[in-house]
Image (cartoon, rainbow, N blue to C red):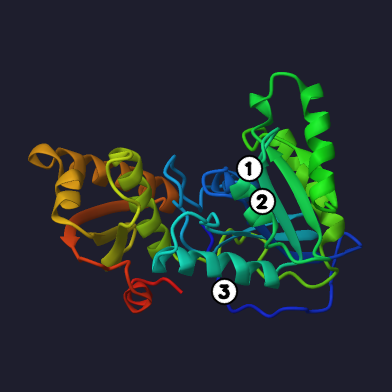
C-alpha cells in the first residue's frame, strides 16, 4: 500500500505523459448517509481505503483516495454523510467537514440511489456551490428492475440542479467504474500531479488501522451500539514485517462496553480477529493486535473532546 503526505503542492504547471499534458484535480464524493460513498471510493481507487457498514455515519473523516490513469490523476475525497436529524457536536463537526470539502474541489460527485430522492438527498444537494461542475451518480443501478422507469426520475433531477453529467452505474461493476473515469477526465485541470503515480491515499497506516477496527466494531454489533463510539491507537511498533498494535475502543456508557466485549469476551475477540486479518492483507505484514474497551462519558458531547480524538 502506498501512502503519501497530505501537504502536496497545488496548481503546478502540467508535464506530459505519452505526449499528453497531465491532468489532476480534486473530486468530492457527497451524498446522504449510507448511500454508498465509501463503496464507490474504494472501487475508484481499486483498493479499500474507506470503511463501510450498514450503520449510517460510518465515515467520519475527510479521506483522500488517489488513482492515476494514463495522464490523469484523480484525487477523490470521501466525506461523511451530511447529517440532518441530530444537531449534536459530533454531527456539526462532520457537517463542517462536508461543507469545507465542497469549497475546495474541482468536481462534485453527487451520489443518490437510482430512482430515489428524499429530503436527506435534497439537503446535501443544496450545499453544492453554484457553478461547481457536479456529476449526478445514480448508484445501485442493478436494483432497478426496468431502466425505462429512470427517465421520469432523471427529468425531475435535471429540474432540481444543472448537473454537468448523469452517470447511472453500479460501483460493483468495473466497466461502470472505467466509464466514470473517462467521463470525469475532461473536467480535471491541466496541471502537474499532486501525488506519485502509485499513491493510493494520503492517510497513514495507523489511521487506516483505527478505521478498520471501527468498521469491524460496527459490523459485529449491528444496531445495538450507538455510532458515538471511536477507536484510538495507543501503540504502534514496526519490527520488520511485523506490526504490534494496541488500540482502545472508546464508548460513552458501561452498557456499551458490555455489548462490545460480549459473553466471555467472545465478541471483542471476533472484532480483533477480523480486524487483524484485514490489516494483514492491507499492509502485507504480520499483525499482532491488542484491543481494549474504555468508557469515556460524553466524549462526543463537546467540540474540545472531539478534537482530542482527532476530529477537526
Determine which residue is flagged by label 1: 118
Of 196 and 78, nearer the camera is: 78
Furthest residue to the right? 19
Left or right, 283 with reference to 269? right
The answer to which quarter of the image holds residue 281 is top left
Q: Residue, x 84% and y 72% (percent of image)? A: 15
Q: Nearer the viewer, mark 1 or mark 3?
A: 1
Of 263 and 13, nearer the camera is: 263
Badge 3 element? loop
Q: Position of residue 297 (x, y in %)?
A: 20, 65
Of 247 and 81, nearer the camera is: 81
Closer to the chain start, of discs 1 and 3, is: 3
The answer to which quarter of the image holds residue 265 is top left
Closer to the chain start, of discs 2 and 3, is: 3
For label 2, count other residues whose C-alpha is less than 10 Å away and answer few (under 14), some (14-19) or many (20+). Answer: few
Determine which residue is flagged by label 2: 122
Q: Position of residue 216 (x, y in %)?
A: 34, 45
Q: Residue, x 82% and y 72% (percent of image)? A: 191
Q: Residue, x 66% and y 47% (percent of image)? A: 111
Badge 1 element? loop
Left or right, 239 with reference to 159? left
Determine which residue is flagged by label 3: 6
Q: Position of residue 117 (x, y in %)?
A: 67, 40
Q: Position of residue 56 (x, y in %)?
A: 45, 47
Amino acid at each position: 500500500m502506498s501512502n503519501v503526505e497530505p501537504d502536496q503542492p497545488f496548481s503546478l504547471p502540467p508535464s506530459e505523459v505519452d505526449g499528453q499534458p497531465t491532468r489532476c484535480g480534486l473530486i468530492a464524493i457527497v451524498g446522504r448517509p449510507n448511500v454508498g460513498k465509501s463503496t464507490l471510493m474504494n472501487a475508484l481507487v481499486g483498493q479499500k481505503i474507506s470503511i463501510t457498514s450498514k450503520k449510517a455515519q460510518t465515515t467520519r473523516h475527510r479521506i483522500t483516495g488517489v488513482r492515476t490513469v494514463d495522464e490523469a490523476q484523480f484525487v477523490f475525497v470521501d466525506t461523511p454523510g451530511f447529517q440532518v436529524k441530530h444537531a449534536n457536536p459530533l454531527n456539526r463537526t462532520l457537517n463542517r467537514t462536508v461543507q469545507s470539502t465542497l469549497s475546495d474541489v474541482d468536481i462534485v460527485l453527487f451520489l443518490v440511489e437510482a430512482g430515489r430522492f428524499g429530503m436527506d438527498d435534497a439537503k446535501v444537494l443544496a450545499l453544492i456551490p453554484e457553478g461547481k461542475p457536479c456529476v449526478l451518480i445514480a448508484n445501485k443501478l442493478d436494483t432497478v428492475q426496468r431502466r425505462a422507469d429512470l427517465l421520469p426520475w432523471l427529468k425531475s433531477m435535471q429540474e432540481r440542479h444543472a448537473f454537468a453529467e448523469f452517470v447511472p452505474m453500479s460501483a460493483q461493476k468495473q466497466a461502470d467504474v472505467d466509464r466514470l473515469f473517462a467521463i470525469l477526465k475532461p473536467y480535471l485541470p491541466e496541471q502537474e500531479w499532486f501525488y506519485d503515480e502509485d499513491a493510493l491515499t494520503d492517510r497513514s497506516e495507523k489511521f487506516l488501522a483505527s478505521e478498520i477496527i471501527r468498521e469491524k466494531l460496527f459490523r459485529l454489533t449491528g444496531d445495538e451500539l450507538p455510532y458515538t463510539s471511536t477507536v484510538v491507537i495507543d501503540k504502534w511498533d514496526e519490527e520488520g514485517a511485523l506490526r504490534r498494535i494496541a488500540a482502545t475502543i472508546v464508548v460513552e456508557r458501561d452498557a456499551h462496553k458490555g455489548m462490545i466485549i460480549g459473553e466471555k469476551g467472545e465478541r471483542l475477540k471476533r472484532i480483533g480477529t477480523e480486524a487483524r486479518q484485514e490489516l494483514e492483507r492491507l499492509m502485507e505484514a504480520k499483525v499482532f493486535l491488542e484491543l481494549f474497551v474504555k468508557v469515556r462519558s460524553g466524549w462526543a458531547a463537546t467540540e474540545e473532546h472531539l478534537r482530542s480524538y482527532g476530529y477537526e
